Image (spheres, rainbow, N blue to C red):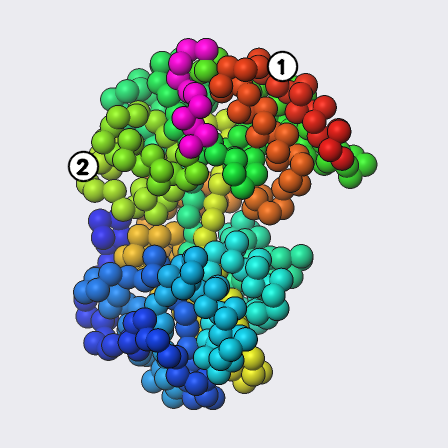
Amino acid sequence: MRRFAAAIALLLVVGSFAPIGSATAARQTSDSLTIWWPSSLYPAVDTTAQALLDQQRVRYANQAGITINIRVKRPEGIGGIYSTLRNAAVVAPATVPDLIIVRRSDLLTAVQDGLVAPIDVTALRIDDWFSSALTLGTVGGVQYGIPYTLELQHMVYLLKAFDSQPHRLADIFNAKQSYLFPGNGSKGVNATLLGQYLAAGGRMVDDQGEHTLDREPLVRTLSAYQRASDDGLIGADWLDYNDPDSYLALLTNSSVTAGQIDSTSYLGMGTKEEAAFGYAPIPDGSGVVDGWLWALTAQEPQQRERAADLLRYLLDTDRLSMFTGNLGVLPARRSALEAWETDYATFADALLRSNIVPPPDEIDPMLGAALQAAFESVITGKQSASAATDAAIAQLAELQ
């Protein structure tokens, strides 16, 4: 991998995983551990990342004197990790794995259903997590998920379209360029707008602990979009974008000159595309991050202890750094990312240490709805920034 040069060929150990997609998982025993792994995070066959992961499995299994079974499953939906876990817990408890890797959204549901156990972070003896990564695994103040890999959203821009690096929306719109980002609010307020409102000094809770929207920061945030809407640089199409994947092709083929992208997509860019684009923080905003989390599903105390010991092994700085660097995803530990020793790693490290937008489930639904309604009203030309702000504040007051 061009961003992660490392002499690793001599380190690789030949081994094989348990059958992928096996219909019936082996009964859990004290001399085995089973992991359900999302297919979107599993390395492609015959890649360095696959060989590294296989090496880690074989070495740990030999060291601990156990068998490690990995079942690769859909990350979500019917047949996905969570839905399969929920069904297995009812009809076939013996097939429930010891560890799963899931997104925060599935972790929340698994916690509600009592399918995962809290994890003692201190027992892992790791003290250099990115704080935003730990937040992804925290539910109700309890750590249920251990961060593994992260996806950080940031801006990319076509170098030839700008005289200098754009830092603000005004820099982009002054150049008569548009900025693509996930503007859809089907899961609440879009994270880009929320981050820009917070970065402008806006609050979500006032001094009395009540949910609130501050007028001046919100007017300032929406004014940039009002201008872009008036100039035809942004419109109702933005409400169709749920995530960066929904418009990624428009960026990579240079149809659009600036937009929001996630780190996994950026790291997967070809050499030609990478050379054509610069990267920068989200203009006027805060970082947006998601990721994959380990969760403990083992029922027996001995199995839970074995699972935690395996996590300590896999999350070792060098192992995590080499695996994620070759897979093309960001590690959740600072030391693992620093070991990449690349400009992009330095950039990502700085963003992950700065202000990060809270997970969507931590946003008050009424506040999020009011913010999103204001945004939609402005970009579709129905209201000015000032009028939309007043309407949002009134809407929140009425709903509370």
* Residue occupying image coordinates x 52% and y 68%: 86
Q: In the image shown, does 189 or 86 lie closer to the viewer?
A: 86
Looking at the rendered image, the quarter that the C terminus falls into is top right
Q: Position of residue 364 (x, y in %)?
A: 66, 41
Tell me: residue 244, above or below residue 87: above
- Kind of residue at badge 2: Lys
Q: Is residue 29 left or right of residue 390?
A: left
- Say the numbered circle drawn on residue 272: 2
Q: In the image shown, does 341 or 66 lie closer to the viewer?
A: 66
* Residue occupying image coordinates x 42% and y 11%: 231
Q: In the image shown, does 343 or 62 lie closer to the viewer?
A: 62
Circle 2 SS class: helix
- Kind of residue at badge 1: Ser
Tell me: residue 229, above or below residue 54: above
Q: Earlier in the sequence, mark 2 or mark 1?
A: 2
Q: Position of residue 69 (x, y in %)?
A: 36, 78
* Residue occupying image coordinates x 48% and y 34%: 184
Tell me: residue 209, above or below residue 71: above
Residue under circle 1? 386
Is residue 356 visible in the rendered structure shown here? Answer: no
Closer to the observer: label 2 or label 1? Answer: 1
**Mark 2 and mark 1: Cα distance apart in space:** 43 Å
- Say the numbered circle drawn on residue 239: none
Residue interval drawn in magenta: 230-240
